[in-house]
Amino acid sequence: MQADQVIGSTCPYCGVGCQVSLNIKDEHILRVEAPFDAAPNYGRLCVKGRFGLDYVHHQSRLKAPLIRHTPQPPGQRSPARYPDDWHEATWDEALDLVVRRLLELRWQHGPDSITANACAKATNEDNYLLQKYVRGVLGTNNVDHCTRLCHAGSVAALQLAIGSSAMSNAIAEMKNLECFIVTGSNTTENHPVIGTFLKEAVHQNGAQLIVVDPRQIEMTRFAHLWLRQRPGTDTALFNAMANVILKENLYDEEFIAARTEGFEEYAQSLQGKTPEWAAEITGVPAEDIRAAARIYARAKAAAIYWGMGISQSTHGTDNALTLVNLALLCGHVGRPGTGLNPLRGQNNVQGCSDAGGMPNVYTAYQPVTDPQVRLKFEKAWHTCLSHQPGLTTTEMVDGILTGRVKGWYVMGENPLMSEPDLNHARQAIQHLEFFVAQDIFFNETNVYADVILPAASFAEKDGTFTNSDRRVQRIRKAIPAPGQARADWEIVSELARRSITRICQAADEHTDSPSADMDRVICHSSEQMLAEWIYAHPSEIWEEMRSVTPDFYGITYQRIDQEGGVHWPCPTLDHPGSPYLFAKSFPRGRGKFWPVAYGTDSELPDDEYPFTLSTGRLLYHWHGGTLSRASALTDIWPECTVEMHPQDAGHLSLQTGDWVDVSSRRGAITARLLVTGRSPQGTVFIPFHFVEAAANVLTDLRLDERAKIPDYKVCAVRIAKATAAPIRPGAETPLTQRGTIKDPTAP
Ligand code: SF4
């Protein structure tokens, strides 16, 4: 069938940021193709990008603002059902209610009683405006997003060691690699198109690949060496590799002298961390550790790629630090084909962080605690700003429980699928005084909200996403949004204007409030603020964002349209952009070695809970499943599976297809067993996409102290054959609610 038009955009699933051609017919996405001449994917797409975008047409898209009939008293908030508990409202009605309730909390309990989630699936422009609203109008730095739950350990480590947490290499360099390590990343399922480039590097160009992973992922079939460490023992293994490199004089003395600090202390810390010592801890043969160290150190250029298997741990920062130490030791950074590359998960998790969707930084990591930076933003936004870093997402949940947080604004995220120990998070959310959510679907979290604001999907708006290798790329409006749904940036700018007006109208009534000083500043500059909060198009938001962000200054919509995308840092209009980083220096000056001791705070298996649970993603689904399970992909992989090693299954007399109860100290789920040698003996793997068997009911609240990231990769569980199959998987879930919403297009 012939399309009416073909619109170029960016895939909304993962951080690879594949360029897509949306073939549009009668305001529907007829098919999805990929241009062969466009980076980063050059015609390649995975199953999600090719066949998983039909969710935008799903009958249960939110089409009108919804207000809950009955107020929810703190402590007794419960999930609502559609349509019984909601009524459709006008935008005026819904926005006025949101403004009134948020400002009441702000006046009564202070700005820090409100928190907000930015959204790693929304555009840079959407997120820039959300954090600007939270900081510049509400008056708090309580804004964070799901990066906290996926790569906070990597971010913390990279900031400590080199001062920048972005991927240091472009995707385009991958197929020409000479040597690389992949660890904690099931690349072919989680970043499938990157997986194809990495396989090409090995198969066609003879690159040497070392895979370090407890699971037998597809990349192990391409590896020269596969080190299968016990879950949670990464630091011991990488320290032992460094020990070999030191002992055999394979390190780069010149690089260490010119570009690093802390080497002596680090070298001292490696004494005794021999391959034999690590073999005891990790289960990896000492000779394999030696071989891996020699391959990596002797390569002229070598890169490291890692995923959430490294960062989602109580020692996620330490794990990532051991990788940075290795790269500094061998001088494998600052040149093409070398570098440190945390593969980012969500399509715009890089951009959401870049746009200031974090509690301690404005755009491009400019700290809220720096008076000069703060002054710059105060002048640009005509307001006054808090110097106090805000709460992280995990701290927000605890803050609700302790009464510190009263109001929550969630833009496009689903914490009740993604937080660890979901029963704890569900208990917390019941205590909110006011809860507003903005989304394209009902999800497990927003059914608790007082107000739901319907948002446009990626195909229904303009803007930019920044992919995992820092490439700023366009999305373009291809179809109209359903019903009354609006782009996130439109909703937030309307909220901001209404809030500013309301603050000025009522400031005299709140002169004793904790926000009185800020109110005076806002009233004084309200005319400028109101004018500045009018945006005709996201390009105007980008223009404002680049004007306050030196790293983005050289990137314009015109350039992105002409060049397809631009890598930041790009400080001037004639700068070509930066496909790889750190050629001459690191943002913190010298790279710093950090000694890391082996130890674990994870919940380890015992007699009562004898298995280790590791959670992760599947090729056919995406994160909380909100999008992929509303697409054709759900027919391919319809239900949750528990991966178990054949010997463990044999001991428990279980076989593939059995229903099993999986329980931890936090809760229990029932799911289908899949017997496979992919997971090592003693470890089970459960994907976290399925609400009817939500893996995070089982996971643990323990956090990495520095990064505040939870331990999603190691906790203790028990497995038993289920006495009965679940009566109806999905019962009581918003997915089932979706099915109950009448399709307005049906006859
Ligand atoms: Fe989309 Fe990622 Fe697949 Fe590319 S690799 S098509 S960005 S999900």
Image (spheres, grey):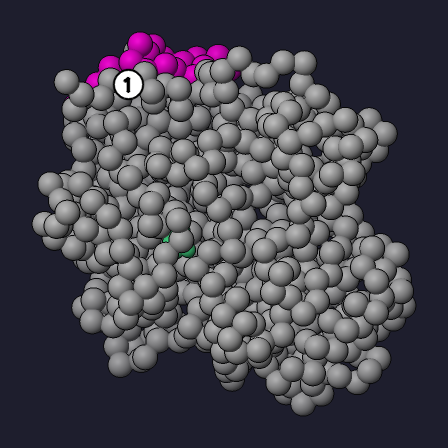
Residue 331 x %, y %: 63, 81
User: Dot 1: few (<14), some (14–19), or many (≥20) neighbours within 10 Å?
Assistant: few
Q: Position of residue 303 (x, y in %)?
A: 58, 73
- Can you see residue 733? yes
Point out the quarter of the image occupied by ligand 1: bottom left
**Residue 637 x %, y %:** 47, 36
Q: Is residue 72 magenta?
A: yes
Count of numbered labels shown in the rendering: 1
| Magenta span includes 171 | no
Residue at mark 1: 741
Residue 675 in the image, given as x and y percentages of width and height: 67, 37
Q: Which residue is painted at 33% across and 50% down in the image?
A: 50
Tell me where the magenta segment starts and ends, as one range: 70-90
* Image point (36%, 14%), residue name: 81
Q: Is residue 179 above or below residue 236?
A: below
Quick check: 470 above or below 645?
below
Frontmost residue, 269 versus 669: 669
